[in-house]
Structures are given as structure tokens and as C-alpha cells.
Image (cartoon, rainbow, N blue to C red):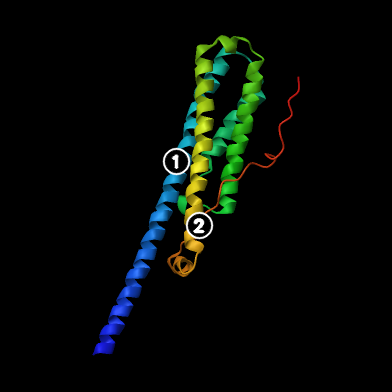
Amino acid sequence: MKKTLILIVAVAAIVLWGISIYNKMVQAEETVSQAWGNVENAYQRRADLIPNLLNIVKGAAEYEKSTYEAVVNARAAATQTKIDANSLTEENLAQFQAAQDQLSSSLSRLLVTVEAYPEFKANANFREFQAQLEGTENRINTERNRFNDVVKPYNTFIRKFPQSLFAGVFGFSTKAYFKAAAGAENAPSVQF
């Protein structure tokens, strides 16, 4: 009887310990999901600003049609590339980031093209949207950094022993980090 009671207490302690580890993994994964939602929200804000910026630019000047179309197409591709917070793998995140990088590149070309038109410097609507877009780019960077900040403790926790045993059993897997875009290690060249 005494051995049975000890065995029951030991099993109950192990089960409670396992439940505790599982709950910590769920909490950490939810933190990652929330951070990913914040990243998506920042990118969505940028996507929402782009049509207004394009309308201002389109209405104020005739400029390269290809630049305009590149921004429209890149925005469409970026908003169609979605990742579920549960599938933040290296491959999925790289695909998402490639679409976002294409949009950033198209926006940069648009802004360079716009610089050739002096009337934009006097256009209050354009200046306002340009400032909003710059602020949004800063928010995106901030949210990406925060995302990486919450992915690290999550990945560390589920990879440590004995949590790694529970993680495998319950289907928890590591999440990918945001990485710098290809070529980011090279400083841009400025020519006058």
C-alpha cells in the first residue's frame, strides 16, 4: 500500500511537472505569435499607405509608368504572401521577406523618381505620406527586432533538455529569425 502511494505521488509529480513545461511552451509560443502579428500589422500599415502615396504621385506628375507598375505589382505580391504564426520556418520567412524586400526596392525607386519632380517638395500631401511611410518603415524594423527578441527565449526554452523531449511530443518547433536582406552587409554607394 505504501509503495503504491509513493508510486502515485511520483507519477502525479511527473505529470504536474510535464503540464508546467507544456504551459510554459504554450505561453512562449503565444508570445511569438503576438510578436509575429505585430510584424504583420506594421507591414499591413505600409501596404495600406502605398495606394494613397501612388495616387498623390500619379495625380501630380507624369513619370515612368514602369516604376508605378513595379510598386503596384510588388505591393500585390507582398500582401498575398502570408505566413501563419505556427509555420515560421526559415523557408517561409525567407519567402515572406523576399516579397517585402521587393516592395521596399520598388518604393525606393518610386521615391528616387519622385525626387526629379520639384513640385513634390512643395506638395504637403506628398510630404505627409512620405513621413508616414518613413515612420512605418521604422515601425517595421522595430517590430522585426521585437519579434527576434521573443523568438530567442522561445527557441532556447524548447531546445533545452528536458523540454526538448516534451516539445517533440507536443509538436513545438523552433521559429525562424528575421535576417538581413541579401547584400545588406555592403554599404550602399552614394554618387553625386
On the picture, is 150 further left or further right than 185? left
Q: From this viewpoint, which residue is outermost toward the left?
A: 1
Category of crowding for the residue at label 2, using alpha-carbon neighbours closer than 10 angstroms: few (below 14), some (14–19), many (at least 20): many
- Which percent across, then down, holds residue 11? 32, 78
- Residue at x 48%, y 35% (from the top left corner): 42
Location of residue 109 with respect to 154 vertically, above or below: above
Three-letter amino acid code at disc 1? Asn
Question: Which residue position is annotated with label 2?
Answer: 155
On the picture, is 44 further left or further right than 10? right
Secondary element at image label 1: helix
Quarter containing the C terminus: top right
Nearer-N-terminus badge (2/1) = 1
User: Which numbered marker is on residue 38?
Assistant: 1
Viewer-side residue, 57 vs 9? 9
- Which percent across, then down, holds residue 134? 54, 26
On the picture, is 192 further left or further right than 96? right
- Residue at x 56%, y 44% (from the top left corner): 96
When asked about the image quadrant of residue 13, the answer is bottom left
- Which percent across, then down, holds residue 48? 47, 29
- Residue at x 52%, y 47% (from the top left corner): 148
- How many labels, in total? 2
- Residue at x 28%, y 79% (from the top left corner): 9
Q: From this viewpoint, which residue is outermost toward the right?
A: 191
Location of residue 52 with respect to 99 vertically, above or below: above
Alpha carbon of mark 2 to alpha carbon of mark 1: how far? 19 Å
Category of crowding for the residue at label 1, using alpha-carbon neighbours closer than 10 angstroms: few (below 14), some (14–19), many (at least 20): some
Location of residue 30 with respect to 118 vertically, above or below: below
Three-letter amino acid code at disc 2? Asn
